[in-house]
Image: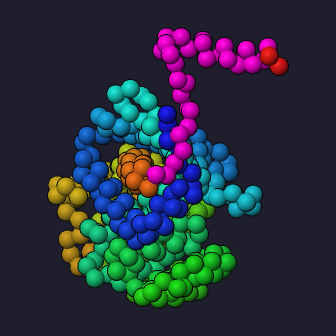
Amino acid sequence: MTTFLAPQDIARIVHAHGLPAVLNRLADTIAADFRRWPEFDKVPRVAAHSRLGVIELMPVADSERYSFKYVNGHPGNGAHGLPTVMAFGVLADVATGQPLLLSELTLTTALRTAATSLMAARVLARPGARTMALIGNGAQAEFQALAFHHGLGVRELRLFDVDPAATAKLVRNLRAVPGLVLTVCASTAEAVRGADIVTTITADKRNAVIIEPGMLEPGMHLNAVGGDCPGKTELHRGVLEAASVFVEYEPQTRIEGDLQQMPADFAVTELWRVLTGQASGRQRADEITVFDSVGFALEDFSALRLVQQLAAELGLGVPLALIPTLADPKDLFAQLQPAAQALKAA
């Protein structure tokens, strides 16, 4: 049988362990898998683009487990009462192909994206960073904010969104967090002024310029999360030219990230090389660093493995008869007989 995890199961896991512990554990799990980078069979995600959004499949595998995620990105979904991002994923046994886990990944994607940002900031942000500008205050903003607060020690969030209601929602959700100061700003320029870290997580599917070179300050780390498909960017190309740029999986980021603006020979560093000591992360206190994050399948692989383990420990999930149970593996046709007999009886 395949175990199915619904959104409420993920919520119960977070409630049982606490959000800070889940985010930190997830960041550590992703980092451990990134250090095994050469062991994985990797490809850029497969995308079907339309005028209104994108639907993608994200596969990856090591010698024991295979996973994929189905995920969309439709910025206009709020008008239909739907999330911008919706996702589910499968974790399967490589030896047999048996699907072991079918899980929601809408909530889990927000957790793993924040955990990945935290993982990168631990090696790229300036030590002692305490102030973060958060540009884009939508569905994933709280997860980013709490990951950096609990995992990196960020104490002040400087907030801006073109939609004041989104910022008001974020303030409402986070105002009771001890030790976290929330400063609502009137513009991106005001929000990033004096920030150690700048996180951009906007939703519009367009070539936007959220951060311009004139906004940069020595030692700033930019966590660019929102650019995640062709034709969607957040950073002026001059920002990339002024910074040391780090990515998850270069072939994918060149198609979908802010990196899509740059020539093919523009130098970037894949983050796994920093985590394994094969490349340097931040080298100077005044260096500007950019994590051009588009999300990669290995992060979902890590998240699926972790939620499978935590759910089993808590007795969560329900068995799902996704695959037929056969008395004779060669006799698939026999599965039709009970249904035929039921129809005759009716």
- In percent of the image, x 64 and y 54: which residue is there? 74
Q: Is residue 68 above or below residue 13?
A: above
Instruction: Give residue 151's position: percent from left, percent from top.
Output: 35, 73
Q: Is residue 271 left or right of residue 222?
A: left
**Residue closest to the eye, 74 or 239:** 74
Q: Is residue 226 above or below residue 169?
A: above
Q: Is residue 89 above or below residue 97?
A: below
Q: Is residue 212 visible?
A: no
How are the residues colored?
A: rainbow
For this orientation, the residue located farthest to the left is: 277
Instruction: Give residue 168's position: percent from left, percent from top.
Output: 63, 81
- Give the position of the C terminus as an image quadrant: top right
Q: Is residue 11 visible?
A: yes
- In percent of the image, x 61 and y 62: which residue is there? 204
Instruction: Give residue 98's position: percent from left, percent from top.
Output: 44, 30
**Residue closest to the eye, 33 or 57:** 33
Is 336 within the magenta? yes
For this orientation, the residue located farthest to the right is: 346
Quarter of the image where one finds residue 341: top right
The residue stretch that appears in magenta: 315-344
- In percent of the image, x 49 and y 67: which residue is there? 15
Is 185 within the magenta? no
Instruction: Give residue 40's position: percent from left, percent from top.
Output: 30, 40
Q: Is residue 300 above or below residue 191?
A: above
- In percent of the image, x 52 and y 88: which residue is there? 183
Q: Is residue 226 left or right of residue 290?
A: right
Quarter of the image where one finds residue 115: bottom left
